[in-house]
Image (cartoon, rainbow, N blue to C red):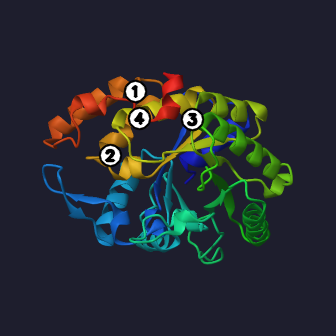
Amino acid sequence: MTSRYEEKIARIRAGQYAKGDFIIADAKDADMSGGVNTAGRRRDGAGKPVGVRTRAEFLAEIRGLIDQDVVDIMLLSASNVERLQEEGAFAKSRVYPAFRANDTTDVWGNVRHGTYRQVPSIPYRGADLARARANLCLYSVTFNNDAAADVASLEAYRAFRREIQQTDKKHFLEIFNPNMPLGLGFAETGQYVNDCILRTLASLTRAERPEFLKLVYNGPAALEELAGHDPSVVVGVLGGSGGTHRDTFELVRQAEKYGARVALFGRKINGAEHQPSFITWMRRVADGDVGSEEAVRGYRSDLQTLGLTPDRSAEDDLAVTEEPLKPGL
């Protein structure tokens, strides 16, 4: 069975992108960022948080979203993709499984009492490419305008590319914003990251290049600049912090408008009161059927129908709070 992802990425690469081809990935790889708390909040019958999910509950949520068959990619840790593959969770689904291939130290932010984000990102990769049970994986790099740290990250990426060439797997490349303060605003950060990306890709032959990019949305100008520079590079955005539901839907809208063709959201989906409904409205925004404000109202109406209590008031939920989104309104 051909996945929707494979069909969509083929059309995008052929310059045939059309309504409905925007790729949505659910980034359920949070367990690689920490421990107990990464599975998200358990909710009672009314949708109210009542503690932290166990791994079993987290996997149950993922199975439900695979069965819903709306997202295009399900990104997991190698251990969880193995578990779900053994159960046959993807056997009858057009959702494409993927796994996180590396977990740099700046990703370890959910380790309780940890201080890993207080130093420049250090490369680390625990997943065994030969054993992982998916053909697509994510590799992440963080540039910090620190020559020694950035060279170490790039050398680790080069070693990864050599290893993955020996398998039948492909990868997409995630580029985080610097995890150390550089004294730059989001617009300047976007310019810095764009130049780091293009400088990195310039060294790669076609066979080595990632399937697509995943990066922080640093505003419309930065995204439009990168997406327009080289049509052969497929650009995607990551969801980032939780924010409001309007932030989520507005990010999807702006990402598509300014040239991204992929969105990979983790916390924004995992923290929703009802994930299947939330994803449905993300899909409608990505397809241009509704705007971000209408999506918030529609999602909240779904919650009311389901008898679930929203986490925020309507006024709060309709607010755009993330600064990079405001220039694109």
Could you tell which of marks 3 and 4 lies nearer the N-terminus? Answer: 3
* Residue plotted at (38% across, 71% down): 112
Could you tell which of marks 3 and 2 lies nearer the N-terminus? Answer: 3
User: Which numbered dot is residue 276?
Assistant: 2
Q: Is residue 286 visible?
A: no
User: Which numbered dot is residue 83?
Assistant: none
Q: Which residue is mark 4?
A: 247
Three-letter code, disc 1: Ser
How crowded pointer 1 is (Cα within 10 Å; few <14, some 14-19, many 20+) is rated as: many
Could you tell which of marks 1 and 3 lies nearer the N-terminus? Answer: 3
Indicate whether 125 appears above or below 5: below
Q: Which residue is mark 1?
A: 292
Dot 2: what SS?
helix
Three-letter code, disc 2: Pro
Query: Residues under labels 3 and 2: Cα distance?
Result: 19 Å
* Residue plotted at (66% across, 47% down): 213
